[in-house]
Amino acid sequence: MLPPSDAGAIWLHARSAVTTASYPRRIDYTIAVSGLDGSRPVSDHYRAGCDPNDGAIRLFPISDEELAQPPPVPHGVNFAFAIGLSEGRNSPAVAAIPAERPAPSPDLLGEPLLSPAYMFGLRYAAATLDAAPNAENSLRVIAIVSAQSPAYSVVLVDTPSIDGVPTYHLKLTPLRKPKQNRLRELWVGTADYLPRRAVIGGNFTVAPLVDVPWTVDFSIVDGAPYIARESAAAMLYLAHKRVIGDAAIAFQDIHEPTGSLYDEPLVAPAATASELIEPQ
């Protein structure tokens, strides 16, 4: 086992390995969202694609299961109660109150606008500049790397094997912005320093998902790390009194597109509270 003083070096090697990993220009994949909706097991599959290098994501927002069994077309008349409010003869106001609450989303956790190449802050970000040529040597500045204070205190816990791969197990304690710096534990391969597993102190951007620990398992495809599965460590209490247990999100069938750009007409919807997105 390496001495604890090497934990910082392992962490830096891991970030460098993730940053320098090479990804295809585009990938297609399936996102499987599963869990217990109360006591009823639910599994929804969505087709998606992304550019791993710039983070652009496209999603077909209707799951395979919903396409196979579309919801019935509602009949009857929608109505609302109207209450008139007025502070004077010339200032009427009307408030319309729906007779029923809006129906919950058919998606278990929301539309998953997600990429399997998201790396939870492990990847270094380079700031590029459109700079004028230097007057002295005519060299253009194409990027800068600024030194920042460390985001985590890092400790080497042990060196277990995960799926037969020897790893370094790191414990990470955020030194600032714990809601942004979410890594709490990290397992990286001893040979390639690529992530095999992580525990994060919250996921995505909305409650209660952001307040619950998640375990993330990674797969290595052609030398690049991808998220294989994200699993919530606690029950999720959602709107409409929905309780979701064993929530998990898996990325399946990751591959480069063949033929046309996408087999389905994918869209890139604007992020709303009903969608699963990762913080940028």
Image (cartoon, grey):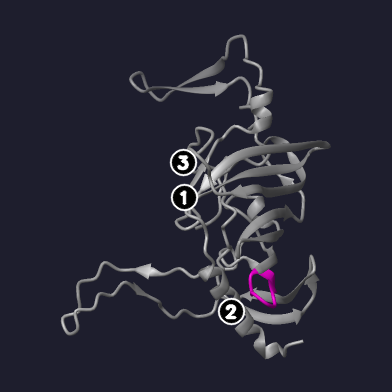
Q: Nearer the viewer, mark 1 or mark 3?
A: 1
Residue in the foreground of this view, choosing between 41 and 189: 189
CA gap, disc 1 and disc 3:
12 Å
Residue 108, picture quadrant: top right
**Circle 1: is it few (<14), some (14-19), or many (20+) Cα within 10 Å?**
some
- Height in image: 136 above or below 194? below
Residue 270 marker: 3
Q: Are marks 1 and 3 in contact (CB under 8 Å)?
A: no
The kind of secondary structure element at disc 1 is loop
Q: Amino acid at mark 1?
A: Ala
Q: Earlier in the sequence, mark 1 or mark 3?
A: 1
- Name the side, left or right, on which 39 lies relative to 182: right
Q: Which residues are magenta?
A: 184-194
The residue furthest top is 76
The residue furthest front is 259
**Circle 2: is it few (<14), some (14-19), or many (20+) Cα within 10 Å?**
some
Residue 75, picture quadrant: top right
Q: Residue at x 73, y 88 (%)?
A: 2
Q: Amino acid at mark 2?
A: His
Residue 56 marker: 1
**Circle 3: is it few (<14), some (14-19), or many (20+) Cα within 10 Å?**
few
Percent across and percent down for residue 28 are 56, 45
The kind of secondary structure element at disc 3 is loop
Q: Earlier in the sequence, mark 2 or mark 1?
A: 2
Percent across and percent down for residue 132 are 20, 72
- Judging by the rendered image, the residue that carries numbered circle 2 is 13
Q: Residue at x 66, y 17 (%)?
A: 72
Q: Residue at x 51, y 38 (%)?
A: 262
- Name the side, left or right, on which 84 lies relative to 160: left
Q: Nearer the viewer, mark 3 or mark 2?
A: 2
Q: Amino acid at mark 3?
A: Ala
